[in-house]
Amino acid sequence: MAAQSTKRFLFGAVVLLASFIWIAPTQATPNLNPTGLAVATDSNGPDNVWTSTLVPNPAITFASCPWITAGLNAQGFNAANGWTINTLTLTGSLSLTNYFAWVTTQPKGTINGSTFGGKGPAFDYGGADALLTYTPMGTDPSGAGVFWIQGILTNAPKGGLGANGVNAGGGFTEYLDNGSYYGTNPYYGNLGGIGKGAVTSTQLFDAPARSCVINGPVIQWYAQTFISTWNQGTKTINIYGQGIEWGFNLSAVPEPTPLALLMLGLVAMILRRRKRMAA
């Protein structure tokens, strides 16, 4: 009898272990490099060329975001005001359905029947287009309780955004991308399409834009985007990794004049002739 009991125990243990292995979900692999322009350029302005470049390209993933932490703290979402911020694991994934550089005319994005973006055309103007898609798995949050939280690091903050952020040094500012809802709602796009984007519980569209100065400093704009949930009653915010970092650099330089192009051509001819004579 003792031998039978032992066999039954071992059999039950094996079955239990197998069940755990069977139900354990596999973490999804995000798409960080969809097809699209990595560099966009326009030379139709007044004697200058402006260029937007994806940075990073491909996008990269992060388990946590100091820009979001800094932005939350700057707006009072912190322990001093009774808030608890948790960083949790995401079994599913965030992926980039769209990710490309653009200039002159901002692309349009349509989510849930509403269209956003489309500003321009304008000289020395450009940015990046991103459509992020969230695929929940296992016990990941889903439905109406899902929100998008986005932290920005840039040397060209706009209006009140920078004023509600943190000086990161070197001319850069860290802040939450939550429009004018400072200190009341930390999320992107859930309140009537904040900024230039829109969201559903599974998608976020954003096409950030800046204008640059000819021969001025390169504009650098980077975002880290995460899925989040919160409970305003208990003052709890949950941020789920992996998040995605994406962004762009924008610059403008004078266009070479016809005389400069002619001189370059002459120099090239002289160098080619000297090379032939040396051979």
Image (cartoon, rainbow, N blue to C red):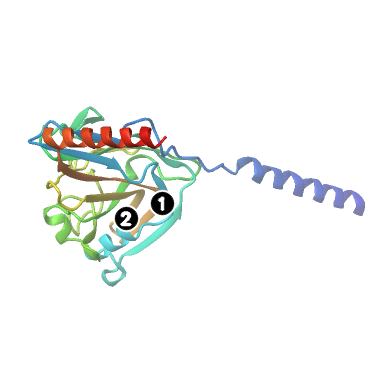
How many tags in the picture? 2
On screen, residue 106 versus residue 15, left or right, reads left
Binning the other alpha carbons within 10 Å of mark 2 as few (below 14), some (14 to 19) or many (20 upward) gives few
Which residue of the protein is positioned furthest toward the left in this rendering? 46
Q: Position of residue 257 (x, y in %)?
A: 12, 36
Q: Position of residue 179 (x, y in %)?
A: 17, 50
Q: Residue at x 26, y 30 (%)?
A: 112
Regarding residue 1, the answer to whether it shows in the image is no
Binning the other alpha carbons within 10 Å of mark 1 as few (below 14), some (14 to 19) or many (20 upward) gives many
Q: Position of residue 69 (x, y in %)?
A: 32, 61
Mark 1 residue type: Tyr
Q: Residue at x 12, y 30 (%)?
A: 44
Regarding residue 82, the answer to whether it shows in the image is yes
Q: Are marks 1 and 2 in contact (CB under 8 Å)?
A: no
Mark 2 residue type: Asn
Does 85 appear above or below 181? below
Q: Which mark is residue 165?
A: none
Which residue of the protein is positioned furthest toward the front in this rendering? 277
On screen, residue 240 versus residue 144, left or right, reads right
Residue in the foreground of this view, choosing between 275 and 222: 275
Q: Residue at x 28, y 72 (%)?
A: 80
Quadrant of residue 52 in the image? top left
Residue picked out by circle 1:
240
Numbered disc 1: secondary structure: strand
Q: Which mark is residue 231?
A: 2
Quadrant of residue 37 in the image? top left
Nearer the camera: disc 1 or disc 2: 1
Residue in the foreground of this view, choosing between 64 and 101: 101
Residue in the foreground of this view, choosing between 61 and 101: 101
Q: CA distance from mark 1 to mark 2?
A: 15 Å
Q: Position of residue 200 (x, y in %)?
A: 29, 37
